[in-house]
Image: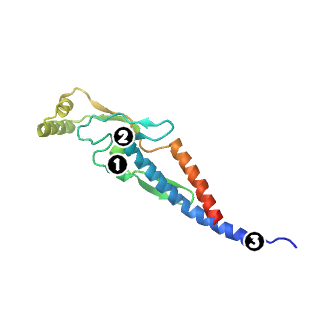
Amino acid sequence: MPNNNTGEFDRLAKKYKAFKRTFPQKAAITMVNFFKRNFEVGGFVDVPFQRWKKSRYPGARATMVRSGNTKREIKKLQVSESKAVVGIADHNHYAKIHNEGGEILITPKMRRFFWAKYKETGNDYWKRLAITSWTHIDIPQRKFIGDSKALEITLDRMLIAELRKALSS
């Protein structure tokens, strides 16, 4: 008499479907927390670790932290059974230049702002920006979100652990 394992197979298939439905949510939460942690450690966690260049901005509490808006904006953008996308919404226009680096054109409006900040604070930093002959400001790359070998390893370990847990219970 042949061994009929149809019931066992159906039970495992249900567990796998439940795992496939819930794992992308857990992975997205892990990715959001991983990228937010970059602000706490002051660099991009990867293999090797990429420390951010120090900020000269006088209003910053730490590099890349003044108001905390960019860190708070890291969210799950799209999660489905086949993928999890984490990032920052398009309306946060300054996050991209910090993540990738680049140049900002100094406009007359910016120069007026620099003068106003100098008059308000008396800080020579603002005066130098207001009277500089530069036409642009170089923003160094301070990557906080993107492909990371360390994140990949974390997600691989999490995938294996979650799959074992789902199929063993």
Q: CA distance from mark 3 to mark 2?
A: 55 Å
- Three-letter code for the amino acid on which mark 1 is drawn: Thr
Q: Is residue 16 among what the camera can see?
A: no
Say the numbered circle drawn on residue 6: 3
Q: Which is nearer the N-term, disc 3 or disc 2? A: 3
User: Is residue 139 depicted above or below 15 in this figure?
Assistant: above
* Drawn side of residue 61 relative to residue 165, left or right: left
Q: Which residue is mark 2?
A: 98
Point out the residue furthest to the left here.
Answer: 119
47, 74: nearer the viewer = 47
Residue 21, image x, y percentages: 56, 64
Packing grade of label 2 (10 A; few <14, some 14-19, many >=20) is: some
Q: Which residue position holds label 1?
A: 70
Amino acid type at circle 2 is: His
| Mark 2 residue element | helix
Residue drawn where x is 21% and y is 31% of the image: 129
Q: Is residue 89 left or right of residue 83?
A: left
Q: Does residue 4 appear to the left or right of 27 in the view shown?
A: right
